[in-house]
């Protein structure tokens, strides 16, 4: 396959990682006409993917063999690197690896340079929008890497997202994603604390949310998380507290690596790290609302 060829259906696309986001994103690719081969170390995840109409490979090597693009949706950059190292001998010449995980930007840059040097394409393309937008294919995708490589991969990205942002060089997509989640988490923590204070004072939490959403305190969390997951006590948004804490720490670490003073990021990262210790790794990220009312 020519390195300049755009990846369009019915090209084969491998999706490595079939979790809460991977499964619906792979389904979007299938609906767009791509030949999708999915793989996950979890046999249960593979079974669910097959039951939903997907084609699950029995090994990662089988999934990537002959694929024009290989998408990784894994927990962190270290796992991405290990997975790619184990698979790359099975990549076709000119294959584009698209890391859609939430990886550390500096590590992404290093990995990408190695893969490009070996003759493959590589871009980082993390997403924002959660499971709901993964299902309907309207994710926001932040893409870092060589412009020509992104051009080739853009039809694949557009099958999963409504907005594709070109953020700059390798690693910039992951940097943008981590910074977005830091800002989101800071807003959520502030909103959850405000609700707890209001309720203690005797204000109906739902009324406070209405006030915030009609005023300058409005943000994504006040609109889409407080009533829906925190005040309701459901705490089932589908995005874990552990992953949010990791992304915030990634943003804070990046600030330190770049020697940029970020005292608020330091505080927010420490708060979410402590919430993870208090609430446990299985907690949903909206359970920061419980943390706000937990005496420590």
Image (spheres, rainbow, N blue to C red):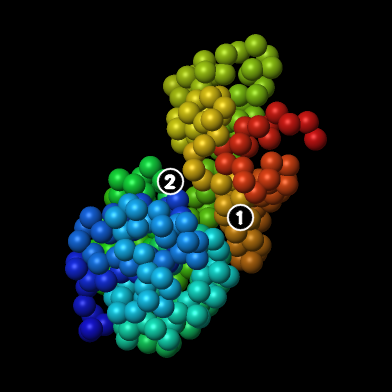
* 155 up-or-down from 85: above or below: above
Left/right of residue 31 with respect to residue 109 in the rendered view:
left
Left/right placement of residue 146 relative to residue 73 reads left
The furthest residue to the right: 296
Q: Secondary structure at mark 2?
A: helix
Q: Residue at x 41, y 57 (%)?
A: 47
Q: Position of residue 280 (x, y in %)?
A: 68, 45
In the image as oriented, which residue stretches furthest toward the top? 202
Q: Quadrant of residue 155?
A: bottom left
Nearest to the observer: residue 217 or residue 74: 74
Residue at 62%, 46% in the rendered image: 282
Mark yes or no: residue 168 visible: no
Which residue is at 30% across, 49% downward? 137
Up the image or down, 1 lies above or below 281; here it is: below
278 up-or-down from 120: above or below:
above
Q: Which residue shows up at 45% across the image and 30% down it?
A: 223
Quadrant for residue 272, please give it.
top right
CB-based contact (under 8 Å), mark 2 and mark 1:
no
Q: Which residue is mark 1?
A: 246
Name the mark on residue 37.
Answer: none
Split into 4 quadrants, where in the image is the C terminus? top right
Q: CA distance from mark 2 to mark 1?
A: 16 Å
Q: Secondary structure at mark 1?
A: helix
Residue identifier under label 2: 130
| x and y, in percent, of residue 4 in the image | 23, 80
Q: Is residue 131 left or right of residue 246?
A: left
Q: How many marks?
A: 2
Q: Residues within 10 Å of mark 1 (few under 14, many from 20)?
A: many
Pick the residue in front: 280 or 163. 280
Mark 2 or mark 1: whose residue is earlier in sequence: 2
* Percent coordinates x, y for residue 291 in the rendering: 68, 35
């Amino acid at each position: 396959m020519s390195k300049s060829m755009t990846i369009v259906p019915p090209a084969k696309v491998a999706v490595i990682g079939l979790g809460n986001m991977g499964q619906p994103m792979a389904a979007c690719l299938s609906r767009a006409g791509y030949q999708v081969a999915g793989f996950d170390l979890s046999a249960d995840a593979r079974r669910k993917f097959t039951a939903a109409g997907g084609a699950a490979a029995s090994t990662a090597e089988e999934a990537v063999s002959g694929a024009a693009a290989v998408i990784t949706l894994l927990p962190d950059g270290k796992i991405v690197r290990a997975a790619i190292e184990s698979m790359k001998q099975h990549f076709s010449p000119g294959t584009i690896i698209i890391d859609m995980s939430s990886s550390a930007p500096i590590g992404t840059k290093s990995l990408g340079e190695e893969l490009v040097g070996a003759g493959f394409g590589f871009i980082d393309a993390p997403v924002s929008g959660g499971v709901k937008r993964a299902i309907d294919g309207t994710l926001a995708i932040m893409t870092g890497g060589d412009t020509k490589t992104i051009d080739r991969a853009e039809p694949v990205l557009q099958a999963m997202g409504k907005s594709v942002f070109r953020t700059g060089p390798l690693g910039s997509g992951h940097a943008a994603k981590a910074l977005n989640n830091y800002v989101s988490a800071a807003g959520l923590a502030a909103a959850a604390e405000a609700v707890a204070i209001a309720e203690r004072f005797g204000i109906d939490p739902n009324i406070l949310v209405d006030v915030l959403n009609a005023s300058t305190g409005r943000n994504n969390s006040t609109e889409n998380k407080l009533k829906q997951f925190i005040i309701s006590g459901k705490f089932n948004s589908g995005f874990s507290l552990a992953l949010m804490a990791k992304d915030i720490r990634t943003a804070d670490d990046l600030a330190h690596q770049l020697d940029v003073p970020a005292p608020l990021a330091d505080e927010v990262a420490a708060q979410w790290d402590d919430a993870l210790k208090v609430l446990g790794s299985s907690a949903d990220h909206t359970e920061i609302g419980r943390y706000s009312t937990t005496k420590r």
